[in-house]
Image (cartoon, rainbow, N blue to C red):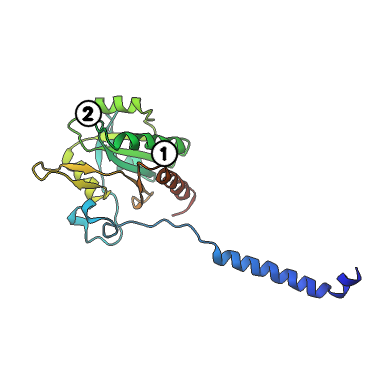
Amino acid sequence: MAFLKKYRIFLITMGIFSVVFLTVAYNLLKTEKKLPIFNPVDVNPELADPSVWHVGRDHRIADFSFVNQDGKTVTQKDYEGKIYVADFFFTTCQTICPIMTSNMEKVQDAIRNNPKVMILSHSVTPDIDTPEVLKAYAQKHHVDARKWNLVTGDKRKIFEIARSSYLAVKTGSEAEMYDMVHTENFVLVDRERRIRGFYDGTKETEIKRLIDDIRFLSESSE
């Protein structure tokens, strides 16, 4: 007790100094999470149409109108104010599509109870993937139509939005107009129709990163 009384001012001062030092150190070392905003100049030119290569800022997903697995017309209005994950696939694909679809099911499970988030999958072979074909595919993969639209439509429009908006599809054969080679990319779009991330839809680690980023956007004011 005598020791504490003798050095109490020193001990109190050191205690206050330690608290202040630790608080400042924590704030300096803490890195606040922030997702980038992607524009055409930020991605592989092979995935973006030359008409948008010059866009260095304020890139937005264009208006769209397609038909989903239930024969319903789906437009940007259905996704207004929503965070969503977009991708490109086709039902007869036997390479990366089954893996991507299985992983998108995991994304669906993660967002099932989150009213702020949806999914939008576009067919790159719309002449084959009719609403009826998409419906069978949706049932096979447990697609919840309230959260996840599989869409088909005019091939030219799908080609244009894939390359001019989502920056996620390569051109295919020059012999066939609007031929598309889809990639493994899942594209994260925010409430303002801006691209906030690209994720390899075939990799578990990337799916976890995507789900974490969805949660971050849902909880933030970005």
Horizontal and vertical percent for residue 137?
30, 27
In the picture, measured across the screen, residue 219 lies left or right of residue 83, that is right
Question: Badge 1, how many Cα within 10 Å: few under 14, some, many 20+?
Answer: some
Secondary structure of the residue carrying tag 2 is: loop
Query: What kind of residue is marked 2?
Result: Thr
Of the numbered discs in the image, which one, if any, rests on residue 107?
A: 1
Q: For the point 65% across and 70% down, which residue is it?
A: 21
Vertical placement of 128 versus 35: above or below? above
Query: What kind of residue is marked 1?
Result: Val
Horizontal and vertical percent for residue 40?
26, 57
Q: Is residue 155 visible?
A: yes
Which quarter shows the C terminus?
bottom left
For disc 2, the marked residue is: 130
Q: CA distance from mark 2 to mark 1?
A: 24 Å
Vertical placement of 54 versus 82: above or below? below
Q: For the point 41% across and 56% down, which residue is it?
A: 35
Q: Is residue 70 visible?
A: no
**Residue 184 is drawn in which quadrant?**
top left
Question: Badge 2, how many Cα within 10 Å: few under 14, some, many 20+?
Answer: some
